[in-house]
Every structure is written in C-alpha cells, then in structure tokens.
Image (cartoon, coloured by chain):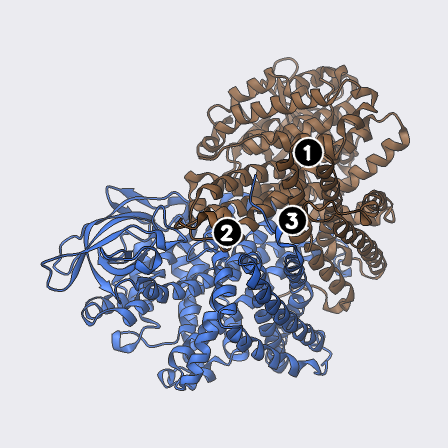
Chain colours: A brown, B blue
Amino acid sequence: MLSYTPPLKDMRFVLERVLDAPEALAGMPAYAEVDADLMRQVCEEAGRFAAGVLFPLNAAGDREGCRYERGAVRTPAGYADAYRQFVDAGWPALACAPEHGGQGLPQVLNCVLNEMTSAANHGWSMYPGLAHGAYACLARYGSAALKERYLPKIVSGEWLATMCLTEAQAGSDLGLLRTRATPIGDAADGAYAITGGKIFISGGEQDMSANIVHLVLARLPDAPPGSKGVSLFLVPKWLPDGARNAVHCTGIEHKMGIRGSATCAMEFEGATGWLVGEPHRGLAAMFVMMNAARLQVGAQGLGIAETAWQNAQAYALERVQSKAAGRPESRRGEAADPIAMHAPVQRLLMTQRAWVEGGRMLAYWTALALDGAERHPDRAVRDELHGQVELITPVVKAMLTAQGYEGASQALQVFGGHGYISETGIEQYVRDARVTMIYEGTNEIQAVDLLLRKVLADGGARLEGLLARVLSTAEAECDGEDDGAHGALAPHARALCALVRRLRGAVRAIARAAEGQAALPHRVAPETLRLVGHCALAWLWLRAARAAIEAREEDPAFHDAKRATASYYFTYVLPEVEQLFGVVDGCLNQAPEDAVCFSV
Amino acid sequence: MLSYTPPLKDMRFVLERVLDAPEALAGMPAYAEVDADLMRQVCEEAGRFAAGVLFPLNAAGDREGCRYERGAVRTPAGYADAYRQFVDAGWPALACAPEHGGQGLPQVLNCVLNEMTSAANHGWSMYPGLAHGAYACLARYGSAALKERYLPKIVSGEWLATMCLTEAQAGSDLGLLRTRATPIGDAADGAYAITGGKIFISGGEQDMSANIVHLVLARLPDAPPGSKGVSLFLVPKWLPDGARNAVHCTGIEHKMGIRGSATCAMEFEGATGWLVGEPHRGLAAMFVMMNAARLQVGAQGLGIAETAWQNAQAYALERVQSKAAGRPESRRGEAADPIAMHAPVQRLLMTQRAWVEGGRMLAYWTALALDGAERHPDRAVRDELHGQVELITPVVKAMLTAQGYEGASQALQVFGGHGYISETGIEQYVRDARVTMIYEGTNEIQAVDLLLRKVLADGGARLEGLLARVLSTAEAECDGEDDGAHGALAPHARALCALVRRLRGAVRAIARAAEGQAALPHRVAPETLRLVGHCALAWLWLRAARAAIEAREEDPAFHDAKRATASYYFTYVLPEVEQLFGVVDGCLNQAPEDAVCFSV
C-alpha cells in the first residue's frame, strides 16, 4: 500500500529560505496580510485535505474508472463527496480576487495546492483543474454580464469549467477547427448558436457540480481561415433560465491512465453561448487559461514525482536484498541489506529527489513571479516579471512533466517486479503521468514555443533577463569559501557560470543559422528548452545550498541532506547539459542536406 | 488500428551486408548448410507467422487478460491455437540440436524469431519464451534419464517450461530463497520432494501445452546458506506415470502490461522433482538458462521498439497539423502539413529508428557471436567469442529494453492525445515494454554485472577484445574519402576512436578508485554500461554506413536512408556519451564523503 505525506518541511524551506516568498509578497499591497504563518497554515490545511481526503480515493478511482450512460457520467465512488468537501473548505476561491468572492491569496499558494492535489490524486484533480484558468480568462475577457453571472459560482466552486478546444482534425493546430458559432437573431443579449464536435474534454460531463461552464473555441460566419478566425464562447450546460443547453456528452475515452477523470466527446447542437473577448481573438483569450493550465500541469508532474519518490524511498529502506558494496561494519552479521544501501538504487532515489526538490523550487519561483507580474506595485517590475513567466512557463510544463513520468518510472524500478503489479500502486503513477507530456500543448510544442516565440522572437531579451539573475548569484558564489561541510559551492557556481556563457553562445549560433535554415531551431528546440531549464535549476540549487548553509544549525540533518542533494544535482544530473550542447553543436555543424530526414 | 510489417529488408541488410552472417556460419561445420537463401526463407516464414497469427491477437489479449479459476489458468482467446500452429510449424525446434530432434539452425535465426514474436505479441511470446533456455540448461546439465524423458518434448514444443526462481523474500537475491528439497527415501531414481512458494512465474500454469516442466531453485537439507546452497530441480506438472504432481498455481497477478501472459504464484507441496546438475550448484546451471533469457529479453525490447516506431511513422505521415517550418514550396497552398514534416516529430521518429536499426545490429551480432562460441571449429575462437558474449549480454539486455520502453513512449508521443487512448493501441506497447527493464535481472543488476563481473574482474581483457575490433574498423575509416553522398564517415570514425580511448581511460580510473571505495564502481555502473553499448553501436553504425555505400546501387533509396540514419545516430544520439563521461568524471572527482547518500 502506498502513502502520501505532504512535504511541508521542504515546502517551507523553498518558500521561506530559498525564495523569501513572505518578504516578496509583503512588497505587494494586495498580499500585505500574507505572512509566513499564514502561508504555513494554508500549506498544512491543503496537505491535510490532499492526504486525508483525496489520496485514499486514488487507487480505487483508477480501478473503478468513470461510467458513461446515455449522456451522463458517473465519477468513481467518493469523488463527488471529496469535491463537496473541497468546495466547503473554500479551496476553489484560494487565489481568486476578493471582488469576485475569492480569498485573494497568491498564486504561489495555489501552486502548492495544485502540487498536493495532483500528488494525492491526479485523476480527481482534473475536475477542479481548469476552474482557475477559466476564472482568470473570464475575469479578464468576459463581459460585465458574463462575469456577474458566472464568476461567483466558479470562484465558489459550485460550478466547474472545461476548456473545449480539440476536435478530431484539430489538436495541436487549433486553426483547423470547424465548430461554428452563428448569431441568434432574436437574442437580446447577443447569444450565439454553437454547433460542432469536440473531443478529449476533461470533465465535459460529470456528477460533481451543479452546472458546467464550457469555454469553447468556434468560428463566426465571417471568420478568416486559420487560427486568426477563432473566437471564444462561454456555453453553460444549464442555461440561466434553468433550461438544459444543447450540449451533450456522447461518450468517454478508455485511457492509459487518469481513469478517474472523465475524458469526454462533446456534441454542441446549436447550443447557446456568449462571446468572450473580441471576435476572432479567441486564441488570445484562451491563452490566459492555457498559460495557467501549463503551470498547473508542471505542478502535476512535480506532485506525481514527489509521491512516487516518497514511496520508492520507503520501500527501499524496507526491502532487504543482497549485501551492499561498502556496507557498514555494523551490518557484518546480516545476510543482506536494505536496497537503499545499494549504489544503483541510491542513484535512482537521489535522481528522483534532486528533480523533485529542484522542480519544486522552479515551480514555486515561477508562481511567485506570476504574483509579482500581476500584483507588484511597480509597473516596470510587473512587466519584467511577466516576461520571465512567459519565458519559463513552457520550461516548467515540459521539464516537470517529463520528470513526473521519468520519476514515476524510476520509482517503479526501485520496487522491481513488485512495481509492475497493479496492487502495488506505483504503476498507476507511471500511467497517470504519461498524459502530462501531451496535454495543454505537447512537450515538443513547449520547446518550439520557448525557442521560437520566447527566445528568438525578442532577440533573447527575456532570456537575458533570467540569465542575468542567474549569473549574479553564481558569480557571487564563485569565490566563496568552503565551510567544510558537504563540498564547496564555488565549483558548482563556476560550472553554472560556464553553462550560462555556453548557452548564450549556442542561442546566438542558433539565431544566426536560423536565417538560412528555417527548420533548424525547431530541430534543436527540445535541447534548448532543457538547457534553459538546467540554468534555472542549477541557479536555484545554488541558492538552496547557500540557504542550507545559513540555516544549518536550526536542523542540521535536514540542511545537510539538502546540501548533499544539491551536490548530487551538480555531479550526477547537470552533466546532461554536455549531451544537450553536443546535440546542438552537432546539428549546427551538420550540412543542411544531412539534416534529419523522414523519408522511407 | 496498429499494424506490424516484418522488417525483412533491414534484417537482410544486417545479416548479409553488415554482419556477413552467411559467411561466418559457413565456417562452422554445424551450419554448413545454412546459406543466405535459407536464412531469408526462415526470416520470411517467421515474419508471416508473427504478423499473420500473433499480431492479430495482441490487443485483444491485453484487453481480455488471463483468467484464474481453482488452480487453472485460461489464456486469452486464440493464444492456445496460435501456440498449436507454432508447434506444428516446428518453431520451438529451430535452434535445438538435431540429436535432440532440433532443426540445428543457428542462434542468430532464433534471435530474429524472438524479435518478431515479441514485436507482434509480447504477452503471447512469454509462453514459449523460456523453452529454449530450459532446453539449453537441460542439454548441458540434465542427467541422461532426464534428457531422454524431457528434451524431445521441449524441443518439439509439446511441453513448455518455466523458470521458478523468485520467492516473496528472494528476488534479485536468490541466496535468500527458502524452498526446500528433501530426498525421497524409497525413490529408486533419486527423486526429491520440493516444498515452498514461488512468485512471478511466467506461464506457471496455462492451457497451451500438455505438460509444464518447471525448473526450480531449492535448498537441499545440507545446503550452506546463501547462493552457494542453491540447487536446481526439474519438477513436471504431470509425472511420468501420468499422476498430477503436487505443484499448483494459487493465483495470477494483475499487472501493468503483458496481461495476456499468466504471471503465477506457485505452491510446491512436496512435489516430486529431480536434481539438474550438481548439488548446491544450481545457480551455475540456471545461468545457462538466464543468459539465453537475457538475450531474448533484449530482442523483446528491440521488437517492441520496431512495432512502435513503424506505427508512429505511419501515423506521422498521415496526421496533418500546422504548417512545418521550412515546408517545401510544393505544399504552399495547403493549410497544414503531415506532422512527419515537423522537425521535433522527425527527431522523435529518427531517434526511434536509429535505436531500432542499431539495436538490431547489436542483437544479431551478439547472437552470431554466440553461434561462434558454441560451434566454431577453432577452440581459441570459441573461447574468445564466448568472452565477447558474456561481456555484451548485459548490454544487450539493459540497453535494448530501456530503448524498447523509451521508443514505445516516443511513439505514443507522436500519436499525441490519441496515443493516450487505449483503442489506439500504442499505450499497450509502453505498458508491456516496462517489465523488460525489470525481469531476468533488473537493468541496474545488468550494469553491475557488466562492470564488476565482466570488465573489472578480468582486468578489462574481454572489454579490450571488443574495443580492439571496434578500433580496427574505426581506424580504417579515419582517413577515408568522402564519396559526397550523405556526409563523410571519417568524422564519425574519429569520434569513435576518441570514444574508445576515453572509455579505456575511464575504466582504468574506475578500477583504481575502486581499490579505496568499494561502492564507487556500483555507482557509475549504469553509465559504464551505456558507454560500452555506444562503443558497440557506433562501431556497427560505421560498418552499416560503409556497407550502405558499397551496396548503394542495388537500392539507392534504402541505402541512402541507411546512411542518413547512421549520420543521425552520430549527430543526435551518440552525444549521450558526453553526459555519461560527465557523470563518471564527476563521481571520480567527488570526495568520498560527498558520495550519494540515502538518508532522510
């Protein structure tokens, strides 16, 4: 049987020691009342809910799955009740603005909540998962009437939301979508009739909320072709007058994982909807929702990796097999050792740990930057942080989901043959995690988004903004003294300085080469994304190691382990950059006619 | 719907052009009659069987799974019939010796067969999967009476075999096993009563063969503790007198994948068995079976990766989304392009392809070396090749299974959201593939086996044997002229020479460091395994590129694609060695007190 313990201690370390979140938030009038105590309290409560209410439903929900019957979807036993508790506790309102009935707490706390709900029950977490994005989208683009009617119910959680984008022929390319919206002639409030089929709609139908608010991409009659002719509509399951709208679920998918989450095919048959934002500008409005979703998907990867690692660690300390090389003298009489003492198992566990703890710093740093981008009193700071969030969002999405899957698989490996057995539970994490690399934009699309739209598009300005921060920390540590504990920071800092310089050179070379070969940056985008990610991770690990040195005496065991994990990251994880640069260099040096072919 | 096309053209290229298999076999009297025509014929027939009989049962077998009822196991619909056809066609006898009723064909053809049965239906292939290993083990260690009674039925396939090793407390560490064997006082033929429980026994019970021959590890009453007190016994389900033996299946596991394969818990309750080999030397006898199984598991990884890639490639050519960067002028009027034209998708496909085609060369090269080790007339050649097979077996097992899983996951990624849907079928390949990294010795155990028992144990002699072959090819290509087609071979050859020299240096450094730190080689074993693997793969790719140049005119499209794939391997795949050396160097430079910790 698996378990889940909210990693409160590490969360506090990251928020308070590494990111100085309370201090950063104190500089924003909107969060003047958010101090360290309040943050701890929210983390503890969220952890209690995730571990106590959601986690016990996780394995059973996977086994039971959802049931579809004549348009209705029955979610697994306990899901609806857990959602009721979630609403009663006010969690949906956490990071919504007080003027809409929200609690007005920062995004960084919402990120903590997302990590924990996903860690405890990824399938369940899909239902409330899109509510915050829908809230943010409506709050920004909705008409006064729509906001008045829908926002309070979404904020309270009484109503849930979906994102209706994908059609059979339009997945990554939303410009190909065919659903149409026709003005309803006699409607006084400017309503439209929406007609078309959507697929892969998470929570398109369910038995958890009284109403479902669909945000639907469709084409107006005069729409230009492609993505510039796509508009966004709000289409509720139940209309304001209490009538059932003409939108129905026609079936649910059988999937590799997140089987507790209903993935619905939806048919809109002249359903009544209202425009959100301007005509033909639907993608811009949808991207407010999409960006929130991408950060959240990153937090899903983080949460999955955390639970998988916790359980692998516990199993490795318990499972006894073979004598470990270099076993301590004290175990001389034992026939075998816990597998946690075997070096290759330690490698698996420490790799998971370095990614989980590093990923947490990256996710929370991004969420805190988002808070600043939204709420900092200084406009220049807001703009700068907004650029940083734009830059790092695809990195968070792609790297943390890749690691959610990889970490779950590494955890399964620690369990050995038992890991492959369904009853053990860990294989569910691998199956669940796999989808995060695909939805809300595949990880390949994240890579292209980063390199083409975020790095090359502004001549590297946003990237330089990040690298300048990184270098400033790294250079300050380059000449640091070793305090003799767990290895010096200076070699790590020098490695990071070198990494930043090499990355700058590589990006410049890619930009130059792109002038002659349009496909080249697309070809090395996956490597570039991971290089940017390692710059950020190495930076945060350096800060974590420094924070661990400074706070050591408060809890020597915890902080020494933190420094050891930082050292592990630099020694065993960061060398991935050598491979990445090797690929980029090889690709740059390749004659164009030797470039990747897809023929035969 | 997925499909499977036996890759006969590539098999012929590897066997005839890269490995010169017909010529190598012609030098062995046992295979004097095996010429290129016969080999092609066997490949074609095996392909027809795999694609025509096994593949259609694959998805349905996964959905249906096995059923357990009061000691009996019902395999999925069609499995038993397919096995009857397999037996009727004589496939079990393929690589068995004529003196035992076998066809006397080489191991390399058995490897081709294994690749294709796994590519078509991994779950089904588990049932006959252990028969050849059991045959090899019994042929070498069985008494005359046991051989006479059991070998012909195993060779013909009438009876299937199992490998009963694992117990709840004894997985990777067989020294911990508790099943006991007590001499039966009045048995004239030296029988033993076997008592104990075994788990994870593939095909421990089934409805496909008339009898099941269990090869069981157990302890004699006077056995010393640990792995030196383990003996091997043959325990048939049905005794020679027609009585049912006291061995029963008490349940089957629900697993992540290979759901058509019955993974049984077995209870031996004083079951009658006979000693195979010497008392307390059971592990040595079992390892004959285990080594055969490890090569076969490598071939499973290869087969899975092949089918996954084929289907991803087909889907990518068909699925149209977005305009590709650098799209050809001819597609100007189209709203979108096949995703196979998008660079990041090409990367996914070409990475799969480079591993599939490279893995095929590695697997077949190893199987051909095994033929030489068994059948070459020159004793010195046999010994040398035996050493090469010992060295490379863990590499084949670990690298090809890691890539089977990774390749299946990459194929799923190409399918996008559709890949996550069960009906698409590709997610089954990911689930099925996952177990190959665990069974027959986890990939971590393969890495330790390679570095500790195969490399460091003989002072690097067997490794030098491989590296000398590699260098001889590489040095000859270093000064080669470019023929102007698809990039020169000389830069690749120089990269390979440099790789060999760095690997030699790294192994020497590890050997030195191991003197002071016993755990150190265990820590870098995973990297060392992949470095040795890349030496072998790069060597084979260089040979493949050369062969493609020489044979170009026979089929320009095929051979140009082969050279492009070789070039892809060197440019995009081989840079992994930079990461691997980075980790090894970092680990060697680390102070022992900073080494991986497992605490907290």
Q: Position of residue A257 (x, y in %)?
A: 52, 39
Q: Which mark is residue A568?
A: 3
Q: Secondary structure at mark 2?
A: loop
Q: Residue at x 62, y 37 (%)?
A: A557
Q: Are marks 1 and 3 in contact (CB under 8 Å)?
A: no
Say which mark, if any, is on residue A323: none
Q: Chain of mark 3?
A: A
Q: CA distance from mark 1 to mark 3?
A: 22 Å
The amino acid type, in three-letter code, at marker 3 is: Tyr
**Which kind of residue does numbered mark 2 sit on?**
His
Report the residue at 57% width, 55% height from top.
Answer: B312
Q: Earlier in the sequence, mark 1 or mark 3?
A: 1
How many callouts does the rendering have? 3
Mark 2 belongs to which subunit? Answer: A
Chain ID, mark 1: A
What residue do we see at 38% from left, 82% from top?
B31
Say whether residue B204 is left or right of residue A273: left
Choose between B180 and A217: the one closer to the eye. B180
In x, y percent, where is residue A409?
53, 47
Q: Residues within 10 Å of mark 1 (few under 14, many from 20)?
A: few
Q: What whole-number distance in Å separates the C-alpha atoms at marks 2 and 3?
A: 16 Å
Q: Which amino acid type is marked by label 1?
A: Glu
Q: Which residue is mark 1?
A: A553
Q: Which mark is residue A342?
A: 2
Q: Quadrant of residue A84?
A: top right
Q: Which is closer to the viewer, label 1 or label 2?
A: 1
Marked residue nearer the N-terminal end (1 or 2): 2
The quadrant holding residue A175 is top right
> Answer yes or no: do the residues labelled 1 and 2 have beta carbons within 8 Å?
no
